[in-house]
Image (cartoon, rainbow, N blue to C red):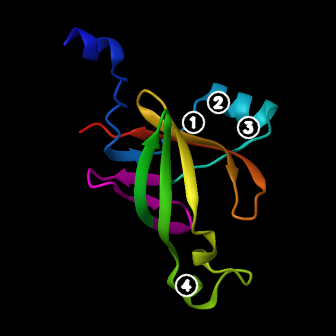
Amino acid sequence: MILCSLGCENSPPEIVGDYEIVEYSISDKLWYGGIKGYDLISGSSITINSDSTFKYITCGNVMNGNWRIVTDTLILDVISNQWRIDSLNIYGFEGKCAEDDIGITKFQIGKNYIQIIDRVTTDGQIEKVIERMYKKKI
């Protein structure tokens, strides 16, 4: 028992549950949006299931896949990505299909939230964004 408490790694926080973006504080808006020049993402939600699957909804997309945790990072392996607007799934948006953005999304894990800072696009570009979602209370 003593050996395990000395040698075992701490388990990650309970990540399973529903998360959503809440209104950003005035200080976050000033610091990230004003001084740092980041776009503050709103309207997203994610459901992290106990079977290691997820559903991630943004303003324009619905993504599904599998998740895993590496140290303090939640990694989403996106398997399917659909536009929320049906006609875009048929005709695309500016020649681009939602399936073009299948890949990995990483969130930093906080005490009661997960967040993306500096999202990397599928073509390797870095977007200066903040997307912070808080766990819903049951």
Magenta residues, start to end? 45-63
Q: Which residue is mark 4?
A: 89
For the residues labelled 2 and 1, say whether their Cβ atoms are less than 8 Å apart. Answer: yes
Cα distance between the residues tagged 3 and 1: 10 Å
The secondary structure that dominates the magenta segment is strand
* Callout 1 amino acid: Tyr
Q: Which residue is mark 3?
A: 33
Q: First in sequence: mark 2 or mark 3?
A: 2
Coordinates of residue 32 in the picture (x, y in percent): 71, 33
Q: Is residue 36 above or below residue 127?
A: above
If the image is split into quadrants, where does the N terminus sit? Answer: top left
Alpha-carbon distance for marks 2 and 3?
7 Å
Residue at (75, 64) in percent of width and height = 123
Q: Residue 52: give x, y in percent of width and height.
A: 33, 54
- Identify the secondary structure beneath mark 2: helix
Amino acid at circle 3: Gly
Q: Secondary structure at mark 4?
A: helix
Q: Is residue 22 left or right of residue 36?
A: left
The residue at which mark 1 appears reads as 24
Please name the amino acid that badge 4 sits on.
Answer: Asn
Kindly check if marks 4 and 2 are in contact, taking CB atoms under 8 A apart as contact. no
Q: Is residue 56 magenta?
A: yes
Seen from the viewer's position, the closer of residues 59 and 98 is 98
Give me the C-alpha separation between circle 4 and circle 1: 31 Å
Above or below, 58 relative to 94: above
Residues marked 2 and 3 touching at CB (< 8 Å): yes
Task: Please identify the residue farthest to the front as the structure is shown.
Answer: 3
Q: Residue 87, relative to residue 52: is it above or below?
A: below
Q: Mark 1 and mark 3 in contact (Cβ < 8 Å)?
A: yes
Q: Nearer the viewer, mark 4 or mark 2?
A: 4
Q: Which residue is mark 2?
A: 28
